[in-house]
Image (spheres, rainbow, N blue to C red):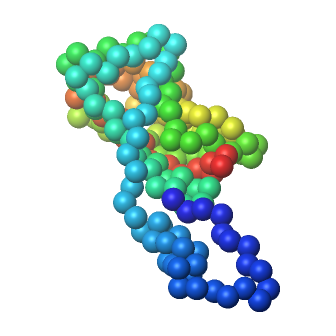
Amino acid sequence: MTFAPRTWVVGEVVSAALMNQEIRDQFNTMFGAWTTYTPTWTSSTPPALGNGTLLGRYMKIGRICITEIHLTTGSSTTYGSGNYNFTLPFTAASSGIAQIGSAQLLGPTGTRWVGQIVISSGVSNCSAFFPISATNTRTDFLTATSPETLASTAQVRLAFLYETAN
């Protein structure tokens, strides 16, 4: 992860070690491996992952965080009730601006829904929005029954970037 650059002093002797730390090492973090994290899946009545999987990964460059979250439900997953949220790896900046990302739901019957992620200013989670139905393209929160009833093998795929608080 990148860090704050050094403040150079007039007349300072620059060594190879300082150049490596200030230039090479920071530059290399932009091409490093992604970092995994375990997001939390929440709603009004909490869902339980059971034998499903919930994976997250991110790459942070400065205050920009590129994030992916992938949920696959299992035969023992319970879906709770209410609007679904997923935790972010870092709190979003309090910029007054909502960030938008992409979302896909692969339903248990093979249907594919395309939606959006919304990250409000200063929060630590994101929400997915999908069309209300095949004929009503206005969007609403992802829930256990919207845009379709979730069951084993359903997949939620989220990809987005946002500005972090730090």
Task: Count every numbered label the image shows and give the total.
Answer: 0
Q: Which residue is more in the foreground, 1 or 162?
A: 1
Instruction: Name which quarter of the figure residue 64 lies in.
Output: bottom right
The answer to which quarter of the image holds residue 2 is: bottom right
User: Percent position (x, y) of residue 43?
Assistant: 49, 18
- The residue sitting at 23% across, 16% down in the picture is 76
Residue 78: horizontal and vertical position, in percent? 32, 14
Residue in view at x 44 percent, y 50 percent: 58
Q: Looking at the picture, how far across and down is residue 22, in whole percent? A: 58, 75
Residue at figure coordinates x 52%, y 38% from the top left: 88
Can residue 103 be seen at all in this image of the molecule? yes
Q: In the figure, is residue 51 to the left or right of 99?
A: left
Say left or right for 109 vs 134. Answer: left
Instruction: Kindly tell me whether residue 132 is visible in this rendering.
Output: no
Left or right relative to 4: residue 21: left
Extreme-left residue of the structure: 75
The residue sitting at 56% across, 81% down in the picture is 19
Percent x, y of residue 75: 20, 19
* Residue 70 against residue 83 in the figure, above or below: below
Compared to residue 41, the image places residue 7 above or below, namely below
Q: Which residue occupies the foreground of this view, 25 or 97?
A: 25
Q: In this view, does 114 lie to the left or right of 99?
A: left
